[in-house]
Amino acid sequence: MVIKGILHHSSRGTKLISMTDFAGQVAYYACHQVYLSRRAFYIVVIDMSKGLEEEVGNYHTDRHNPEGSLFHSWKYKDYFHFWLQTIQTYCDVGKTHTVQKSTDSSGSFHPVIIVASHADKVKEDLQKMFYEKLENCLSDEQSLKNLISPNRYLKVECPPNNLSPKQLDTMECLRKCIVETVERMPQWGEVIPLKWANLEKVLNEMKGSGMKIILVQQLKLKNEDLPSDKDLDYGLRFLHEIGQIVYFAEEKMKDVIIIDVQWFVDAFKYIITDEKHLARESSKNVLINTGRITEYELKETWENSKNKSYIEHKDDILPYMDRLGLMTEVQDDASGLKYYIPSMNRTDFPDAYKYTINSREKTSIMVFRFKTYLPHFFFFRLVVNCLNEWEALEKKLYKTQHFTR
């Protein structure tokens, strides 16, 4: 489990920390990038009563062992590795920070707090070795060890009843660790323009009134006491970074502000978890296992959610989903417009193609090679961008693959 904590500055000068608990089901992983921010610290919770070499699916088949997916048969150490890679990639943290107050004696900033749970189920000698085991399962090549520190590592128990005085002391240590981590972040003490705070207040009021999306021009008309055009763009980008809104100052999106972030994420959630869609026969429609959904199915899924705003704002939502690599339009000569969802594709790459690539034979297959690590979310965005630029020679697309060198 991963929890994100982010620092906010109130109009009264106080500093607030908001916490977000990331959904555990792998189906949601593709949209986690919406919440990841370089302005946040992260708490990674791992069950120390489970062996790092054990497959997570042995305990949570419904959540972590989807047949045919990228995460099939992943071990606990794989998820730990995955989350640190994700944090390092999206959050611009670690060894690049040089601000003195943001470092420990080693000169590295550690934005990740590790909480090892279920200590009450593990022998004391094994508890002492657990942090070392976590550190040893990280590759030196990716500098992931720069993200963690034994000073940001706590062991907690999970009793069925009220916490004992000792357990309460542990919770107090965790609270102090969070405060110390936040105070060492580069954003601590950052001065924010007053008009940005006013902008945040106005957008929160609109969200509270039930609005999901607003056009930039509408925002200007509703409140004249907002930043000028250039400063408004900076203010919107800042609010996007701290997770208050979703906004990209790019073509097709620069005029639209998504006020309700959870509403936007739920729009994608309904697509990938809709049971009626998953149960359809291939003779009627393309199965979700191929990562494709027709425009009719998309509309029907959003209508079934009983939230009319998704259909109403369909043309505003889709460019953002495309930009984030969640889904994109693909043309199918047989049945018209479809949408491709890279994270849902479970179609295996043919063995003949794997052999061709691994043997480095000449081929028309487009292959991207990376020396260390390419985040899955980046790969999805890469696929979406390729499909926007070029037409695939074969209509069949395959899931993300990892090949030997």
Image: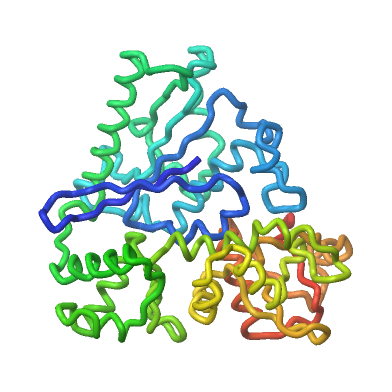
Q: Residue at x 75, y 85 (%)?
A: 336
**259 horizontally vs 320: left or right:** left
Picture layout, residue 50 above or below residue 70: above
Residue 156 is drawn in which quadrant?
A: top left
Q: Nearer the viewer, residue 364 or 213?
A: 213
Colour scheme of this structure image? Answer: rainbow
The answer to whether residue 294 shows anywhere in this view is: yes
Picture quarter with the C terminus: bottom right
Q: Looking at the picture, how far across and down is residue 48, in whole percent?
A: 53, 26
Q: Looking at the picture, how far across and down is residue 71, in whole percent?
A: 67, 48
**136 horizontally vs 205: left or right:** right
Q: Looking at the picture, how far across and down is residue 214, in whole percent?
A: 36, 77
Q: Residue at x 51, y 78 (%)?
A: 312
Q: Residue at x 19, y 65 (%)?
A: 197
Residue 402 is drawn in which quadrant?
A: bottom right
Q: Residue at x 70, y 43 (%)?
A: 65
Residue 274 is drawn in which quadrant?
A: bottom right
Q: Nearer the viewer, residue 145 or 274?
A: 274
